[in-house]
Image: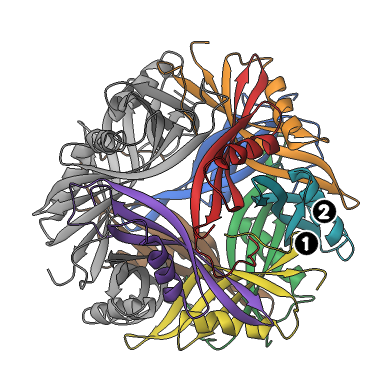
Chain colours: A green, B cyan, C red, D orange, F purple, I yellow, K blue, L brown
Amino acid sequence: MPNTEMKDHVYKILDLVGSSEKSIEDAIQNAITRASKTVRSMKWFEVVQTRGHIEDGSVRHYQVTLRVGFTLEG
Amino acid sequence: MPNTEMKDHVYKILDLVGSSEKSIEDAIQNAITRASKTVRSMKWFEVVQTRGHIEDGSVRHYQVTLRVGFTLEG
Amino acid sequence: MPNTEMKDHVYKILDLVGSSEKSIEDAIQNAITRASKTVRSMKWFEVVQTRGHIEDGSVRHYQVTLRVGFTLEG
Amino acid sequence: MPNTEMKDHVYKILDLVGSSEKSIEDAIQNAITRASKTVRSMKWFEVVQTRGHIEDGSVRHYQVTLRVGFTLEG
Amino acid sequence: MPNTEMKDHVYKILDLVGSSEKSIEDAIQNAITRASKTVRSMKWFEVVQTRGHIEDGSVRHYQVTLRVGFTLEG
Amino acid sequence: MPNTEMKDHVYKILDLVGSSEKSIEDAIQNAITRASKTVRSMKWFEVVQTRGHIEDGSVRHYQVTLRVGFTLEG
Amino acid sequence: MPNTEMKDHVYKILDLVGSSEKSIEDAIQNAITRASKTVRSMKWFEVVQTRGHIEDGSVRHYQVTLRVGFTLEG
Amino acid sequence: MPNTEMKDHVYKILDLVGSSEKSIEDAIQNAITRASKTVRSMKWFEVVQTRGHIEDGSVRHYQVTLRVGFTLEG
Amino acid sequence: MPNTEMKDHVYKILDLVGSSEKSIEDAIQNAITRASKTVRSMKWFEVVQTRGHIEDGSVRHYQVTLRVGFTLEG
Amino acid sequence: MPNTEMKDHVYKILDLVGSSEKSIEDAIQNAITRASKTVRSMKWFEVVQTRGHIEDGSVRHYQVTLRVGFTLEG
Amino acid sequence: MPNTEMKDHVYKILDLVGSSEKSIEDAIQNAITRASKTVRSMKWFEVVQTRGHIEDGSVRHYQVTLRVGFTLEG
Amino acid sequence: MPNTEMKDHVYKILDLVGSSEKSIEDAIQNAITRASKTVRSMKWFEVVQTRGHIEDGSVRHYQVTLRVGFTLEG
């Protein structure tokens, strides 16, 4: 919830779903890595939902829905 | 809520409002049809809100707000 | 969520529950039809909840809770 | 939201996801039909979420998450 | 959440705040008693919020916000 | 959220949408002014939603949805 | 919200609706009493919704929706 | 939800969990009684969550989470 | 919440964060002004969150998160 | 929602209600001004609720509930 | 949020609380491992709440509440 | 959601934001470690929000907002 130093910017928010077999943190990073190919200046994210896929009684993938903010000036 | 076979993809989420004079289902399809002109690889949707327009005591249009997920690889 | 052309009006919001044996859309219309006997100038609605009644393993009625906006000037 | 005649019963609530290629109403009925094989005395349902699957720019399935109440005495 | 026998009716919903020095149940009843002077055919209620007033470290009043459904045919 | 001195009253809640070209505060006042023609004894309000209308890249109107409480004894 | 001493257990959550003519507390107990015929090791509950039934301007029944946690080991 | 006479004050909000073997109302009062040893000028509360503890199929304690407002000037 | 005259359109929704040292209304306008450089046909907005930055005990910036709807045909 | 430069700090969050006869912005500032007498290092706020008091059909006070974050190191 | 390949199935949803001294991911897996003793065909999960237990200023256990979907045909 | 052995205590709830470059779990522990310098008897926490900071397309910090309960008797 903390605020930002970049107080004069306008942010656009992008909603993404990333996945990983390893961890929630890795699913977050995978979404951001993929988005960074086309979107620069991503500054913050917020986790909206954490879900996953089960196979044979084990978690197979974590899927994390994110809201990502980036500066339009970036 | 069910999960997906496409476990390695990163999804981007698009928010849309579609409308129809006929039904809620038709409003959903109209939004998706219009978006499919520019966005490929749409995989799933979630209804966020169902609203509508009234004229002379009859429903004139249904308006449905959707979240639509599509693969960035698509 | 879309906005309205009637930008100078004050709306009052009425909460209703309509029901139908046929469909969700029909339950919405039934609530509006009944309310239109005493309330004119209804302009929009929003679905708040969709519920129903089950008998012998079949949906017997849909019950839809609506918020309905009407102009006070109407 | 309306209340019930069966005021002395205790209800148990079951969460289900039904799907249909035809409509939201049909997805609701499919979930209830399948559950009625093992659960009797289902009395009411509430729609929690409406989602779906898209293929080639068309809705392929509606998926509706329901809460279903049934009497423990049933 | 249970459904109702009065499946063909249209309900109107009224939002009320009742208060009592004694209990939450009494605050609910006080709101309904007062409303029954002008509204007949009230059928069900739902508690939306429970609040209260403190004086000298003791609860002085409970204040309960209700949604009350009544039949338009009543 | 603060509580009230009028602890013995029953309140009825009215939902309104007011609009203004000037400010959010003005949209609130416009809704209350219009409602005060027929409802006396309004005591408090709560902002439920703040929306607006855009024309040519400028905010044209603010639209504020309010819940307004008034005493039934008023 | 407080946490538990039984830190190694896995809980299953059961959703119930209990009712009572007397009080909210009694409706909670009635749901738990009925469920305890078949479910052992219930440890905690959370109130999800409080509703009720009105007859002739008086509360006829309270209906309380609960989430109840019990240990799978129990 | 009702507003307050103390319109010029700034309130600070304190979140508490109280418990009681007797009733929801008693759990509320126990939390306020304990807090009043160190906080004066508590003016209002709002119930955020109602939970409890079950032993041998009976409610053993009610646990109520409250938000309590007090004046900073008090 | 009011509905719209543009009933046949499909809207896309854009999430933005605007900021201003002056007022909440100004933060809304700044977000819309910046977005209008690349997005035409913006029709309505909805305030999702109002936050801000504090320096030395004074509000330094308001930051408002908006959902903005624009027509895909525009 | 934007993030912060002060990435290593731990924040504590304080909930406040401020009021003003003038505007929502002024009610926010009044709460922060009063809290700054005892709390230093306040960095950001988030508006949780906007309410107010009505007298004779006019808004008499705005009351804004805030969450305020401050650094524990401050 | 992504959708599923298993489009014709009806899912039942099970609510569980798992715990672990190691991590959030491990608490999720522990709940699923325990449930897999009696429930086959679990396909997906959604994290509803993340909580934990503190002892002497350290996290002692993570407790994660899950919704788990499994096919009734499984 | 599980309940607690400490059934007679009154808890106070503290809201904190912790951060870490490593993981969500580490951000939780950092907030608790810092708070334990001045607050004893912390017993449980609940994650309210998970956010973070991005630099050059990588997660730089996780920021987790917690509600922490501690006994007033502690």
Q: Amino acid at mark 2?
A: Asn
Q: In the rendered view, does F15 fall on the left or right side of A14?
A: left
Q: Amino acid at mark 1?
A: Val
Q: In the rendered view, does I65 fall on the left or right side of I11?
A: left
Tell me if residue B46 comes above or below residue I16 in the rendering. Answer: above
Tell me if residue D4 comes above or below residue I68 in the rendering. Answer: above
Q: Secondary structure at mark 1?
A: loop
> Can residue A4 be seen in the rendering of this structure?
no
Residue D24 in percent (x, y) is at 73, 37
> Can residue I73 be seen in the rendering of this structure?
yes
Q: Secondary structure at mark 2?
A: helix
Tell me if residue D37 comes above or below residue B43 in the rendering. Answer: above
Residue B21 in percent (x, y) is at 77, 49
Q: Chain of mark 2?
A: B
* Label 2 close to label 1 by CB (< 8 Å): yes
- Residue found at x 77% / y 44%: B25
> Along the line of sight, which residue is nearer the eye, A13 or A23?
A13
- The image's mark for residue D42 is none
- Residue found at x 44% / y 63%: L65
Q: In the rendered view, does A61 fall on the left or right side of F15?
A: right
Residue L3 in percent (x, y) is at 35, 38
> Along the line of sight, which residue is nearer the eye, A30 or D24?
D24
Determine which quarter of the picture holds residue C55. top right
| Cα distance in 3D space between marks 2 and 1 | 8 Å
Q: Label 2 neighbourhood size at 10 Å, few (<14), some (14-19), many (20+)?
A: many
Residue C10 in percent (x, y) is at 50, 63
Residue position for label 2: B30
- The image's mark for residue I10 is 1
Q: Chain of mark 1?
A: I
Q: Are marks 2 and 1 on the same chain?
A: no
